[in-house]
Image (cartoon, grey):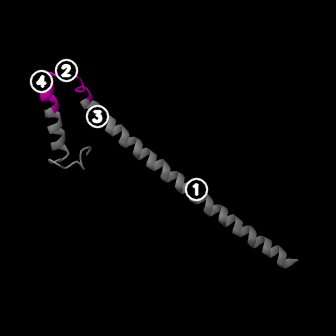
């Protein structure tokens, strides 16, 4: 009878250990998912903000001053982000 009770205690300890490991794994994956979602949300907001500054020029009829303004804005953005001709990897900073 004494061996059976010791075996039950050992099995209980193993089950508690497995539950603890499972809980830590579950928490870690949820924290990782939350960090990824936050980062993705920030990147989307940054992209929308960047695009919104150019949306004012998205129209059928543009005057010469509009063309000069959008070209100047694009050149300034490229200079600020160190983008050279043909380098599309750093467009959004």
Task: Please tell me whether mark 3 sits on a helix, a strand or a loop.
Answer: helix
| 16 relative position to 91: left or right | right
- 6 shown above or below 60: below
Residue tagged by mark 1? Answer: 26
Question: Sequence order check: which comes first, mark 3 or mark 4?
Answer: 3
> In this view, which residue lies farthest toward the bottom?
3
Over which residues does the magenta segment extend?
55-70
Q: How far, Cα to Cα, is label 2 from label 1?
A: 55 Å
Question: Sequence order check: which comes first, mark 1 or mark 4?
Answer: 1
Q: Position of residue 43 (x, y in %)?
A: 36, 43
Q: Are marks 3 and 4 in contact (CB under 8 Å)?
A: no
Question: Sequence order check: which comes first, mark 2 or mark 1?
Answer: 1
Task: Please tell me whether mark 1 sits on a helix, a strand or a loop.
Answer: helix
As rendered, which of 81 and 60 lies closer to the eye?
Answer: 60
Residue tagged by mark 2? Answer: 61
Residue tagged by mark 4? Answer: 65
Alpha-carbon neighbours of circle 3 within 10 Å: few (<14), some, or many (≥20)? few
What residue lies at 17% left-to-right and 31% top-to-bottom?
A: 70
Front: mark 1 or 4: 4
Q: How far, Cα to Cα, is label 1 from label 4?
A: 57 Å
Task: Please tell me whether mark 2 sits on a helix, a strand or a loop.
Answer: loop
Q: How far, Cα to Cα, is label 3 from label 1?
A: 37 Å
* Residue 78 drawn in magenta: no
What residue lies at 40% left-to-right and 45% top-to-bottom?
A: 40
Which image quadrant is residue 41 in? Answer: top left
Task: Please tell me whether mark 4 sits on a helix, a strand or a loop.
Answer: helix
Residue tagged by mark 3? Answer: 51
Q: Position of residue 61 (x, y in %)?
A: 19, 20
């Amino acid at each position: 009878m004494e061996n059976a009770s010791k075996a039950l205690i050992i099995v209980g300890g193993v089950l508690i250990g497995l539950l603890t490991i499972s809980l830590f794994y579950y928490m870690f994956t949820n924290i990782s998912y939350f960090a990824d979602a936050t980062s993705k949300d920030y990147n989307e907001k940054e992209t929308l903000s960047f695009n919104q500054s150019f949306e004012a020029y998205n129209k059928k009829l543009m005057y010469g001053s509009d063309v000069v303004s959008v070209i100047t804005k694009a050149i300034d953005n490229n200079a600020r982000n160190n983008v050279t001709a043909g380098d599309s990897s750093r467009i959004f900073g």
